[in-house]
Image: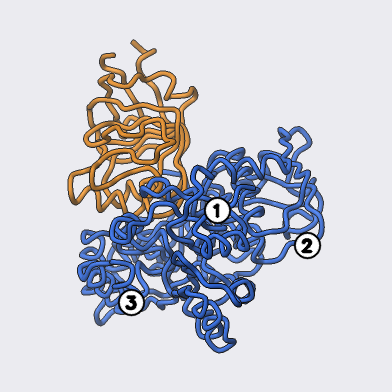
Amino acid sequence: MTDRIFRARHAMGRTVRGTALVANDGFSARYDLDRIAGTFSRPAHKLAGQSYVGKILVLDTAKGGVASAWMLHEMQSRGIIPLALVFNSVNPILAQGAAFGDVPMLAGFDRDITAIVSSGAEIEVNPEMSTLTVIAG
Amino acid sequence: MKLSDEEQDILAGKFGSLPQQALQHQIKVGDFFGAADFVPVSQAHIMADTESLGEAGVIWLEGLASIAEGQLGVRVPTITDPRGTDFAYAAYLGQTAGMVDLERRAIAAFVKLGVTMTDTCINYQTIQAPIYNEHVAFGDTGVVIYSNSICGARSNFEGGPSALAAGITGRTPRYGFHLPQGRRATLKIRVESTPDTLNDWGALGGVIGRLAGNYWAVPVIEGVEGTPRSDQLKHFGAAMASFGSTALFHIVGLTPEARQITDVANADLPLHRVTKDDIDALQKSYHKDDRVDVVVFSAPQLSLYELRDLAALCDDRRFTVPLLAVTSPQVKPDSDRMGYTARIESAGGIVMSGMCFYQSYAREIAEAKGWKRLVTNSAKLVNILGGYGYRPMMASMQACVDAAVSGKLERI
């Protein structure tokens, strides 16, 4: 089953299990989200129109500005937030935001994680072990 | 992370709970990126508009401010990015009393923490530009990329909570662009057409940002002719940071770390060529309508020279749609004093200060004002506003002013 366990170079937060929402696209809370509705709102985003609430987002890279550092905390206060964030490549803002907003995060894999995990798959994010495990799907 | 004796004392709470909490946050981030230790910083710059903070963020700030009473707040000069409103125009923009109240509460908390409310994203043009090799903890991505690239300073993107933590502890985790190896180029760009207008410089930055693709990529750029002005590089860098999450670029023969390409780049870097067609294509891709609801000059805030140029374009014009120009609280009094504000306003425009359009509840403004089709000369602004429900379009400053007169954007 080792082909269903993927190790990340960077990890933070607590272990969670949930449904993956996956795209080979970027992520910025300011640029991409309708944070009131809990959906991706930038028309050009590959997840446009989809709800991210309670999902484990698996995306390529962190994008855009510094606002996400505050916004994850604000989203957490209302419960309109992804369960965890997984990136091929992360920037400091998302890491700072995850630390401030208490959002589990993994980043930095040897393979393109967005090509490995499918949307709808059940996955586990275990920051203590720095692993992403595909449970089903 | 390896902690100094002083840092261990901070962590143990010997200096109070404020620096203790700040350092705990910084250690989480430093550990995530494998930072070996902390590096002292001389300045911090906080992005903290209340649309981003929400009430939860303001309550958190007020909690810190209550701890800070009677204690030292920030220990190095710590300044602020644009606020979420210009109080003089909040009602015009349709901002609610709740939004304005939240802004006032955030400002009161920052002041208690000893933060200097500069409310600007062009501090490198107005407050104090960092110098070569100066380690800083700057917030706004446009500020970071300009400071790193043009000034040769050392900063990562520091989000609001982290920049405030750096101001409180006077240090930041040493990773990323604080390390010499993080500043080496990772891709080479050959610019085949040097822009002139600010929108073309912004579009060029956007194209390169997309090519760079992530925060850790560092473009080294060849082929730039002449010596660009600060405002041109401001738009260039802000757009690159926005489109690519890029924090550092080098221009061979211009920026301080790249007197020659071998100073920053190995010979085997991937090469990308960027043409005039690429610059035009990015801008045309946003031109999806001909009608215009509002014209906005913002992101970054306008310098005195930009306002001077805008004022000249406004003479003897009469706008049929709103035109907003946003600048810093430092530039606005000079714009007033030089008569630029009056010339822009006599055509029907408005000059705001201390805010930035996209950081000021842009979605709620769109709904309150019925603004959807927005024209700007800022590549950064068009990149951001799509997610806020706008149909943003890009044009030169001249074409933007013409659009404010006619209500239509001419095809280029």
Q: Identify residue type, mark 3.
A: Phe
Judging from the image, the colouring scheme is by chain
Residue behind mark 3: B87
> How many tags in the picture?
3
B409 left or right of B91 in image: right
Query: In the rendered structure, which disc, 3 or 2, sits on the residue that comes first in sequence?
Result: 3
Mark 2 chain: B
Residue furthest to the left: A78
Residue B1 at x, y percent in the picture = 43, 50
Report, in whole angstroms, how far the alpha carbon at label 1 lies from the one at label 3. 30 Å
Chain drawn in orange: A
Query: From the viewer's perspective, is residue A74 above or below residue A49?
Result: below
Determine whether the residue tagged by mark 3 lies in a helix, strand or loop: helix
Mark 3 chain: B
Residue B331 at x, y percent in the picture = 53, 79
Q: What residue do we see at 57% from left, 58% from top? A: B377
Chain drawn in blue: B
Residues tagged 1 and 3 counted as in contact (Cβ below 8 A):
no
Residue B251 at x, y percent in the picture = 73, 52
Closer to the camera in the image, A117 or B19? A117
Closer to the camera in the image, B157 or A59? A59
Closer to the camera in the image, A79 or A128? A79
Mark 1 Cα-neighbour bin, 10 Å: few <14, some 14–19, many ≥20: many
Residue behind mark 2: B227
Residue B182 at x, y percent in the picture = 60, 47
Mark 3 Cα-neighbour bin, 10 Å: few <14, some 14–19, many ≥20: some
Q: Identify residue type, mark 2.
A: Thr
Residue behind mark 1: B409
Q: What residue do we see at 32% from left, 71% from top? A: B92
Q: Identify residue type, mark 1.
A: Leu
B28 left or right of B309 in image: left
Mark 1 chain: B
